[in-house]
Amino acid sequence: MPTARTAAVVGAAGGVGATRLCVEAGALLAAAGEDVLVLDVAHATQGLSTYVDARLDPDATALLTDPSVAVADAAYTLDAPGDGALDLAPAHASLTRSAEALTPEAGERVGERLAEATERYDYVLVDTPPLLTNPAVGAATAADRVVAVTVADDRGVDALARERGRFADVGVEASVVVANRAIPDALPDADVAVPETALGSESEAPAVTPADPDDYTRSVASLLGALFAVDELVDDAAPGFLAGLRRRLS
């Protein structure tokens, strides 16, 4: 079986933290020496743009509407620990241009852009909204893996059930289900629970601490292990004391 290198990280509902999880997972891979791109197809919310302090021209919508724009043109580097690179390709466009990036043709181009990105990056994570738009469907059907992100409350359970129905409609399944901001076993269907943590603002991202891993960092590493079969992202013997203390004091 070919090695998985791309994943659509699907937020089962708005506000479940899929965007931040993409950034933190990408940072942990970069800390291990991998080159990573986070590609935004959540054009309605454009949340990934808040992590980049730069003029976003071109942005991710251009990748789905203008064949002359290369993936590298819409990628902006975020400082991350380690020897790898973490680039973000956020959507940051007007309503008109965002609408142009929602057509069926634009959805089909997502797969083409993923193929292009894997020529430059070791891993590509796609920040994906619920499968209600053509680009979201394009990401879920073209990526090697699909992650369903939800929260462990009634809203999150209902959202996950709806999203699984949408997955079935387009012929995909969730490779990994993540209960975000949750204690272990809070959501029985979850493969990974990512704890509630004081991550700080987008300007302080990434918050993972691979050199001194706390529970949050270890849970993100578990997600990546389940998703891409990568290990040794964190030192299992490291106590993570300093990272945990910093979070409690922040």
Image (tube, helix red, strand yellow):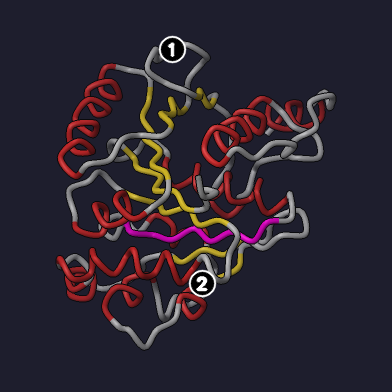
At 60% from the left edge and 68% from the top edge, which residue is drawn?
A: 77
Residue 235 lies, in percent from the top left, at 80, 32
In the picture as drawn, the residue positioned furthest to the front comes out as 1
Question: Left or right: 220 with respect to 69?
Answer: right
Type of amino acid at the residue the image marks with label 2? Ala
Residue highlighted by disc 2: 75
Nearer the observer, 97 or 107: 107
At 69% from the left edge and 36% from the top edge, which residue is drawn?
A: 231
The numbered mark at residue 150 is: none
- State the quadrant of the C terminus: top right
Magenta-colored span: 34-41
Pointer 1 or 2: first along the chain: 2
Q: Answer few, some or many: residues within 10 Å of disc 2's Cα (few below 14, many 20 plus, some between 14 and 19).
A: many
Q: Quadrant of residue 156?
A: top left
The numbered mark at residue 186 is: 1
Q: In this picture, is 148 found above or below 87?
A: above
Nearer the observer, 214 or 107: 107
Type of amino acid at the residue the image marks with label 1? Ala
Residue 152 lies, in percent from the top left, at 38, 19
Q: Quadrant of residue 95?
A: bottom left
- Magenta portion: prevailing SS class: strand
Q: In this picture, is 185 found above or below 13?
A: above
Q: Is residue 158 magenta?
A: no
Question: Left or right: 56 with respect to 13?
Answer: right
